[in-house]
């Protein structure tokens, strides 16, 4: 129904009860129409309470993404202009790539489910329907390629901060692109880019954040070393609220990335990082090193000292934990 999105907007923007009569007058339609749409929304997973003489109120949002609500949340920030919301995709990363040339501005792709979610090196990323944030962000800054080496560092700090600040969970960054709680992965992200010798044309940053999986659901898909915000926080996570926090944090850190060197966040980043003081296996291409990370350079490279005392620099190694 063409009224659906208007009614969602009316209800979502209002914390109090709003009467059917009022909505009907505002949208110039009948109260029966309103009632019909409300029933449809309930069917789609909205919890809507209705009280005689008072009207309607949303008490719980659906677990799946609704374009209208995502749009309202995006209107609160300035970096992402448009959202592509899909119930199912192969991978948000692939969909983002396929529309990148049609879109002049920065945008986001969100899906309830991915059938071919991918991590780094083409590894599988488990993306159960309605249980996590499966998202790709496309940004088109005018920056030289060399600046990209610090992008992940700013983004990882943004994600880590959301977990700590809004959910009071002690999470750590695993350089260069994961967020852990203890020894379990809560979030993985990867950054791809389209560039030529003149500079960066587009950044495609894919974020997979586990929100509402249970332990059993992870076991079923073979992810024994994964965790979700639900498991850590102990109660169901509202995906829209999480999205709002995350985009807010990314907007702030992305704007900082554009104008500031890594040195500005280096101390904070290092204090939120989990790889210090332990001997780990680092792999980057043919380079395999067993050693200890000792520092991060201003260009984002990780300095590792091997067991026999040699110093190595890594740009984006794979680290066995
Ligand atoms: P990664 O290669 O570091 O992590 C992949 C590894 O993590 C897998 O090999 C597996 O062991 C484990 N794993 C798989 N699924 C999960 C999960 N849900 N939770 C925890 N651990 C898991 C990290 O890659 C980057 C992942 C990016 C995913 C996003 S989702 C939106 C976008 N679309 C897409 O296809 N990828 C990105």
Image (cartoon, helix red, strand yellow):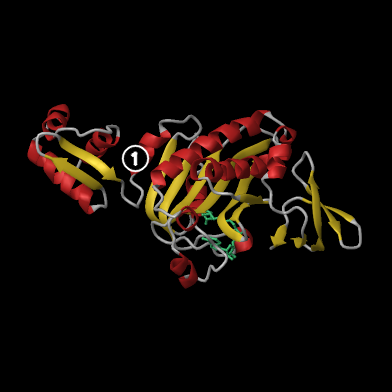
What is the x, y in percent for residue 263?
75, 34
Quadrant of picture, ligand 1: bottom right
- Who's the residue at 51% across and 47% down the image? 136
* Number of residues whose C-alpha sits closer than 10 Å to that of mark 1, classed few (under 14), some (14–19) or many (20 or more): some
292 lies above or below 3: below
Q: Nearer the viewer, residue 110 or 31?
A: 31
Position of residue 227 in the picture relative to residue 13 (left or right) = right
Of the 4 image quadrants, the one containing the N terminus is: top left
Q: Quadrant of residue 146?
A: top right
What is the x, y in percent for residue 76?
42, 30
255 lies above or below 43: above
Local SS, label 1 = helix
Instruction: Decide if residue 233 is in sight here.
Output: yes
Instruction: Decide if residue 102 is in sight here.
Output: no
Of the 4 image quadrants, the one containing the C terminus is: bottom right
Q: Nearer the viewer, residue 91 or 215?
A: 215
What is the x, y in percent for residue 73?
40, 36
Position of residue 31 in the picture relative to residue 57 (left or right) = left
Residue behind mark 1: 69
- Who's the residue at 73% across and 38% down the image? 267
């Amino acid at each position: 129904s063409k009224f659906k999105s208007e009614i969602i907007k009316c209800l979502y923007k209002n914390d109090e009860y709003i009467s059917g009569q009022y909505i009907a007058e505002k949208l110039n339609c009948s109260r029966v129409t309103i009632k019909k749409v409300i029933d449809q929304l309930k069917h789609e997973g909205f919890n809507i309470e209705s009280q005689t003489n008072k009207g309607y109120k949303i008490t719980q949002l659906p677990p799946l993404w609704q374009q209208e609500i995502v749009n309202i949340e995006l209107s609160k920030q300035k970096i992402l202009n448009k959202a592509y919301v899909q119930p199912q995709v192969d991978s948000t990363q692939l969909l983002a790539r396929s529309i990148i040339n049609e879109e002049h501005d920065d945008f986001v792709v969100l899906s309830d489910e991915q059938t071919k979610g991918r991590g780094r090196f083409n590894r599988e990323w488990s993306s159960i329907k309605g249980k996590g944030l499966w998202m790709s962000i496309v940004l088109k800054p005018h920056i030289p390629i060399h600046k990209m080496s610090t992008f992940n560092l700013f983004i990882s700090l943004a994600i880590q901060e959301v977990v700590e600040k809004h959910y009071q969970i002690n999470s750590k960054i695993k350089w260069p692109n994961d967020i852990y709680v203890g020894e379990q992965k809560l979030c993985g992200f990867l950054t791809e880019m389209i560039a030529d010798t003149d500079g960066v044309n587009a950044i495609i940053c894919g974020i997979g954040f586990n929100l509402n999986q249970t332990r059993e659901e992870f076991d079923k898909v073979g992810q024994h070393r994964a965790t979700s915000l639900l498991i850590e926080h102990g109660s169901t996570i509202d995906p829209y609220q999480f999205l709002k926090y995350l985009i807010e944090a990314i907007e702030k850190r992305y704007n900082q990335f554009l104008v500031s060197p890594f040195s500005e966040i280096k101390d904070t980043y290092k204090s939120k990082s989990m790889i210090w003081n332990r001997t780990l296996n680092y792999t980057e291409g043919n380079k395999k090193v067993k050693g200890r990370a000792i520092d991060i350079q201003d260009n984002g490279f990780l300095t590792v000292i091997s067991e026999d005392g040699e110093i190595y620099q890594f740009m984006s190694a794979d680290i066995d934990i």
